[in-house]
Image (cartoon, rainbow, N blue to C red):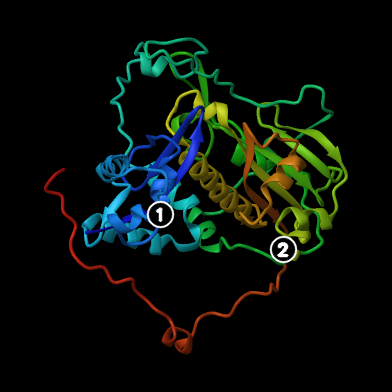
Amino acid sequence: MRLRRRRCLVCYWHAAAFVVHGYPRLSPLELHPVAVEMLAAFDDWIELDRAMEDLVGFDRASIEEAVAVLRENSLLLQEGSDEATEDEKIFDQWGPWAPEASLFHYATQDEHYVRVDLTFDSLESTANDADEVVDDGIKHRVHTLFTTYPEADRLLLPRGSTRLSEPFDQVLHRRRTHRDFTDQPVSLETFSALLATVFGPVDFIDSGRSALLRRTSASGGSRQEIDAYVGVLNVEGVPPGTYHYNCLEHSLELLGEGLTRDQVVELCGRQEWAGATAFIVVLCTTIDRMLSKYRTPRAYRICLLNAGHLGQTFALAATALGLGPFQTAAFHDSTVAEFCGLDNIGRTPLYILAAGHPNEDPITPPLAGLDTFRRTSFYTNQRGSAKFDDL
């Protein structure tokens, strides 16, 4: 019988414990660091007796005991087993994304959800915003609604002068990602309307402990953990610079004066066309707002999804206002965090949005023709059928 170390496996220190974390469906396991040497001996399919030759300094009994523990916890796999087949398939599928992306994907799957009594006096509905010890012994983070820079110079923006009145179906079908812009400045009214529509409060709800705000985009648990930091290049009445959008005041809080097109290009992964936009918006998450309710790492998925919700609303609203939007995840996180004045620990950038006046004759790819479709793979063929017997 030949054994091999699980390919889908990550080892790390957590506090004072050495942890071996296999995936999928495996829980993190605290082991003695000597487990690394044991696992390393089974890098490829090998008989136990042959592996023992490389484990100098261990007697047979201790090796057999360790191997039994590693097999019991599916960290050593038997050749030809279903687990080994699945492990190889996952490892090959995720390829260069592994282990970072695959570990995050599988380690945050299949959470156990507690049914919440939605009466306002229930613990789950009222503990959202309490910085206090509750029945589970965990101290909750304070949930704050807004971020502000009280000492910053600020520019109060006009309210309600521009409306989004274009039919929704037309906006949906006109939306494009633009990369070709004119030098025409964006009016202050249009710029202001876009920020208010995407990032401003729509209303406030009672969580049972405190108020939570709602925007025009979905947000998990109404945490609204994402703030907008704005880099202005070409907006009427707004000097080029770096700002925080204070959505409660509907104002821009000045963080840094001056901004050049070359700087924006550098921020956006050196994509040259990014420097032609009128402004960029960096979506940054405040981790404590999400931690104030959700204590499982799966919640970070929600942060990423929330950024996507805001990005789509931004693109549609910009289109309705006659602007050309674009969005990118191609940026150097620490550089963008420094640009926004963030610590990149509890507050970190997730996404960059931007807009400007689109060129009337933009450089766009041609529509696909018959020859294009002839060289196109249309379908991913699936075998088997879904099974719902156990649901």
Quadrant housing the C terminus:
top left
State the SS at label 1. Answer: loop
Left or right of residue 192: residue 108 = left
Residue 271, disc: 2
Q: Can the viewer see residue 298?
A: no
In the image, what residue occupies the spot 53% across and 19% down?
141
Label 2 Cα neighbours within 10 Å, binned few <14 / some 14-19 / many ≥20: some
> x, y percentage for residue 233?
81, 51
Question: How far is mark 1 from mark 2, CA to CA?
Answer: 50 Å
Residue at the disc numbered 1: 54
Which one is in front, 68 or 74? 68
> Which numbered disc, 1 or 2, marks the residue that appears first in the sequence?
1
* Amino acid type, mark 2: Gln
Left or right of residue 321: residue 256 = right
* Amino acid type, mark 1: Asp
Left or right of residue 271: residue 152 = right
The answer to whether the residue labelled 1 contacts the one labelled 2, judged by CB atoms less than 8 Å apart, is no
Q: Nearer the viewer, mark 1 or mark 2?
A: 1
Q: Can the viewer see residue 95?
A: yes
Residue 201, disc: none
State the SS at label 2. Answer: loop
Quadrant housing the N terminus:
bottom left
